[in-house]
Image (spheres, rainbow, N blue to C red):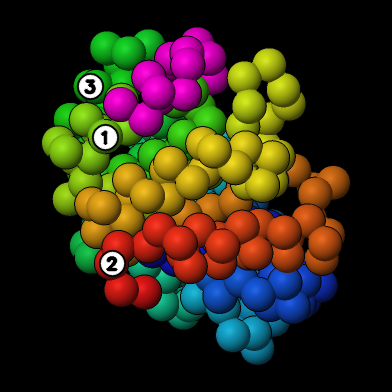
Amino acid sequence: MQLATKFAPSREACGLASQAGFGHAELWTDEATLGAWREVVEVVSRFPLDYALHFPNRKLAEPLAVSGAVELYRALGCRAMVIHQPQFDRYGDALLRREPGLRLAIENHDLSPTAFDDWARNSPGLTLDVEHLWLYTLADAPLDVLLDVVRRFLERHVAKLRHVHLPGYVPGWATHRPMYCSREMVYGLFSLLDEFGFQGQIVSEVNNEYQTLNELRMDVLLHEAWAARYRRTSA
């Protein structure tokens, strides 16, 4: 289980994440980032962080999208590449032809319960976005319902789960807030993922306004407090 933050790659963002105590990060990318992948590697490899990538969400020039994404993934030794369903449908085959060992992890979004089950069953690799599940699929159902759905998901699909997005969502509040804003939910998810032996990144996916040293540090401290009390598996 690897606590991570998410940001667009820059020296400043990497420095903040490291200073806050994160050891892992998911890099947001766009066409410009992929086109400058060598420069990105030069900057982010200077920091003691392990990386995953988020493939761009918009339609791109395919040769650039494929080659830049794969080269960046290889150069940083990434363990997963998060990708949305439309981009997987468009670019997935080309990405895998270029790098057959690529660990693509398709993210759930605004899916109905039936579509969520189909996504989990049919995707070759998964990114579970807990906020999307609670907000869209479960329509802000009670927390015990969310935890029960995640447990059943893990029982069936943990072998394909490569990545987790876990902002501190609370029904009725804004999205992409820090983990500490929803301590009870986050502790419940930490414990479930620990119980099932998940070893990928768990990402505090927050808006730019929360990407400050104090806010980032609060989430690291939250994870440390949980680990001191509840962790079952070894780090």
Label 3 element class: helix
On screen, residue 127 versus residue 161, left or right, reads right
State the separation of the CA atoms marked 2 and 3: 30 Å
The tag on residue 171 is none
Q: Which residue is mark 2?
A: 233
Residue at 77 percent of width and 71 percent of height = 16
Most foreground residue, 217 or 199:
217
The three-letter amino acid code for the residue at tag 3 is Asp
Residue 7 lies in magenta, yes or no?
Answer: no
Label 1 element class: helix
Residue 53 x/y as whole percent: 50, 59
Residue 143 lies in magenta, yes or no?
Answer: yes
Looking at marks 2 and 1 on the same chain, the residue that comes earlier in the sequence is marked by 1
Most foreground residue, 60 or 123:
123
The three-letter amino acid code for the residue at tag 1 is Arg
Mark 2 closeness class: few <14, some 14–19, many ≥20 residues within 10 Å = some
First to last magenta residue range:
135-148
On screen, residue 47 versus residue 109, left or right, reads right
Mark toward the viewer: 1 or 3: 1
Q: Which residue is mark 3?
A: 118
Q: Which residue is mark 1?
A: 151
Residue 33 appears in view: no
Q: Quadrant of residue 11?
A: bottom right
